[in-house]
Image: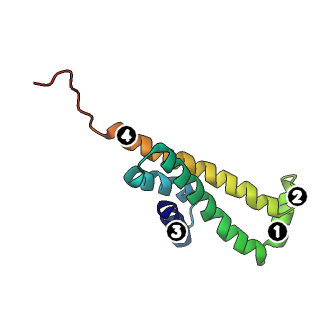
Amino acid sequence: MKKMIICTILIIVLQWVIPLWWWVLAVPLVFCYFSADSNRQALFTGFLGAGLARFVPALMLWFGPARIISGRVAVMMQLDHGWQLLGVSFLIAAFAGGLGGSTGFMINNFFKTKKSYIYSA
């Protein structure tokens, strides 16, 4: 839980400083490369971290001035309501972050040196 919160805060801060969409993928990849203990933990850390990092600011904007434009974009995407767009953006970011976190853990496992006992002297 603590790692997911740290990952979420890192994504939000980096998107605030440098607004690039791919922080959602890059931060969980690097974060889970160094800190994940299992593939499941890396997947859920990236999934919830990236999803919440996109959902919370979008929710704050939706309650503010962006409710009208989100409703119009939702109509263009053939959704019934503007709040459904928040769920869609959460899922897209969450899947990207989950894949990034899982990939970071798998890359870490790939580069770990494992002892081979076949040719031990």
Identify the residue at image location x=39%, y=55%: 35
Which residue in the structure is indicated by mark 2? Answer: 75
Q: Earlier in the sequence, mark 4 or mark 3?
A: 3
- Asked whether the residues under the numbered discs 1 and 3 touch, taking CB atoms below 8 Å apart as contact, a structural biologist would say no
Q: Please state which amino acid type lies under the numbered disc 2.
A: Val
Which residue in the structure is indicated by mark 3? Answer: 9
Q: Position of residue 36 (x, y in %)?
A: 42, 51
Q: Earlier in the sequence, mark 2 or mark 3?
A: 3
* Crowd around label 2: few <14 · some 14–19 · many ≥20 (10 Å): some
Residue 65, quarter of picture:
bottom right
- Give how far apart the Cα atoms at labels 4 and 3 are: 25 Å
Q: In this rendering, would 106 be left or right of 84? A: left
Q: Please state which amino acid type lies under the numbered disc 3.
A: Ile
- Give how far apart the Cα atoms at labels 1 and 4 are: 44 Å
Image quarter (top left, top right, bottom left or bottom right) of the C terminus: top left
Q: Please state which amino acid type lies under the numbered disc 1.
A: Ile
- Asked whether the residues under the numbered discs 1 and 4 touch, taking CB atoms below 8 Å apart as contact, a structural biologist would say no
Q: Nearer the viewer, mark 1 or mark 3?
A: 3
Q: Please state which amino acid type lies under the numbered disc 4.
A: Asn
Q: Earlier in the sequence, mark 1 or mark 4?
A: 1
- Asked whether the residues under the numbered discs 4 and 3 touch, taking CB atoms below 8 Å apart as contact, a structural biologist would say no
Q: Nearer the viewer, mark 1 or mark 4?
A: 4
Which residue in the structure is indicated by mark 4? Answer: 109
**Residue at the top extreme?**
118
Q: Which mark is residue 44?
A: none
Q: Position of residue 18 (x, y in %)?
A: 52, 68
Q: In this rendering, would 62 be left or right of 13? A: right
Which residue in the structure is indicated by mark 1? Answer: 69
